Image (cartoon, rainbow, N blue to C red):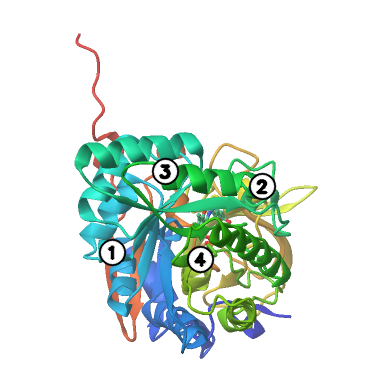
Amino acid sequence: MTAELATPTGAPFFHYQAGELRAEGVSLAELGQELGTPLYVYSRGALAAAWASYQEACVGHEVLVCFGMKANSNLAVLKEFARLGSGFDIVSGGELARVLAAGADPAKVVFSGVGKQAWEMQAALEVGVKCFNVESIPELKRLSEVATALGKTAAVSLRVNPDVDAKTHPYISTGLKENKFGIAIEEAPHAYTFAASLPGIAVVGVDCHIGSQITEVSPYLDALDKLLKLIDQLKAAGIALKHLDLGGGLGIRYDDETPLTPKLLLDKVFAQLQARGYGHLQLVLEPGRSLVGNAGVLLTTVQYLKHTEARNFAIVDAAMNDLMRPALYEAWHGVLPVAPRSSEQTLYDVVGPVCESADWLARGRTLALAEGDVLAIESAGAYGFVMAGNYNSRPRPAEIMVDGEQFHVIRQRETFADLIRGESCLPD
Ligand code: LLP
């Protein structure tokens, strides 16, 4: 297949028109030229469409969708979701500060994470988050102390580890016994009884998150089944819950995966809840990747084409510090020339300038390239910019939001001054 015929993973918001890749109505070649690369480009329409796919799947049911903001925490992105009515799943005091800066409603915030510190608990209690997803007995004790000292009550959901295989990459699988996350499901009844006995704690829900980039329904249904059995047990012990949080994890298309749509999953989840007599429970979801992943690309420019005996390298100006997923998970991201050429195609490894062999973005791709060509690394809207760093003293890229024919700079490119801010030398 030639690049001209490729369907971008972000279609229809990213699409070829007259031989040129566009984000909505904006030419990516022109954007790259005007603002420079590497450059993250998001589509506002794609965010809204992903949100709508959840809303449509939830019609007639009581559901709170809390965007797993670790996937993309740019203020403009958060504000878009807040405007659409989203809640937020946060994992740190920093993420709490961001959702508040975006004007989000704290009553729609759930606080996840295995290592919450006292100051983070305090900040969340002061603004009145909906719920803490608590992952251990020591965390419960600390939360009880912090809440009592403030004269507040912390609404708590225990994150249980249902020991199911999400059938995804081991680094992003979280619901197995050997993972650090959650309270083992066998120990959960005891943990609930303990939580219910603590001052400053109100037990309101149950939570799990089994992993990320999940493409099958069965791991979710297995986890749900275990959670419902636990809820039966708790009910018998006089502990009634108000909500059930199934976490995030829905996969997207990076290559040839068949993504699990919200409707495909939720129809089955609602049916199971109904059948087991729990149709009244509020369902909470924490999707990250599936709301933003295919709404963004990373633009990068070919610097050099280097042909060696073993390989052909396209050396580009983006690197592992800008998009860490390939280096960290051997993740596959599509590579599309923004202005495909018809010259002869060659097999390339697309690599960055960082001094590490792990610094590659894509391997073994058939492309027709010349120096100066701009490429779009696809599906970079989730876990892209948020995982970027400054290794090799590389400033982090700018972020752009396209809206129809318009574009907005939603984060400026870092400068050298940004890189050394806060550093100082020893006295002479
Ligand atoms: N809720 C909790 C408690 C989580 O830990 C996560 C993701 C989510 C929700 C959102 O999951 P999602 O819907 O995005 O799958 N950096 C990795 C992904 C790490 C996911 C961590 N937790 C990657 O680039 O693939």
Q: Nearer the viewer, mark 4 or mark 3?
A: 3
In terms of depth relative to the viewer, which is nearer, 250 or 253?
Answer: 250
Which numbered disc, 2 or 3, marks the residue that appears first in the sequence? 2
How far apart are the alpha carbons under marks 4 and 2?
Answer: 18 Å
Q: CA distance from mark 4 to mark 1?
A: 16 Å
> From the viewer's perspective, is 134 left or right of 320?
left
For the residues marked 2 and 3, what is the alpha-carbon distance in whole angstroms?
19 Å
Q: Which residue is mark 4?
A: 244
Quadrant of the drawing holding the C terminus: top left
Q: Is mark 4 within 8 Å of ligand 1?
A: no
Answer whether residue 426 is visible to the viewer in this image: yes
Nearest to viewer (mark 2 / mark 1): 2
CA gap between label 2 and label 1 equals 31 Å
Mark 3: amino acid: Ser
Along the line of sight, the residue nearer the viewer: 191 or 344: 191
> Which residue position is annotated with label 1?
107
Q: Earlier in the sequence, mark 4 or mark 1?
A: 1
Q: Is residue 310 above or below residue 244?
A: above
In the image, 141: left or right of 175? Answer: left
User: Dot 1: few (<14), some (14–19), or many (≥20) neighbours within 10 Å?
Assistant: few
Is there any visible trace of residue 374 in the rendered image?
A: no
Q: Earlier in the sequence, mark 4 or mark 2?
A: 2
- On residue 197, which mark appears? 3
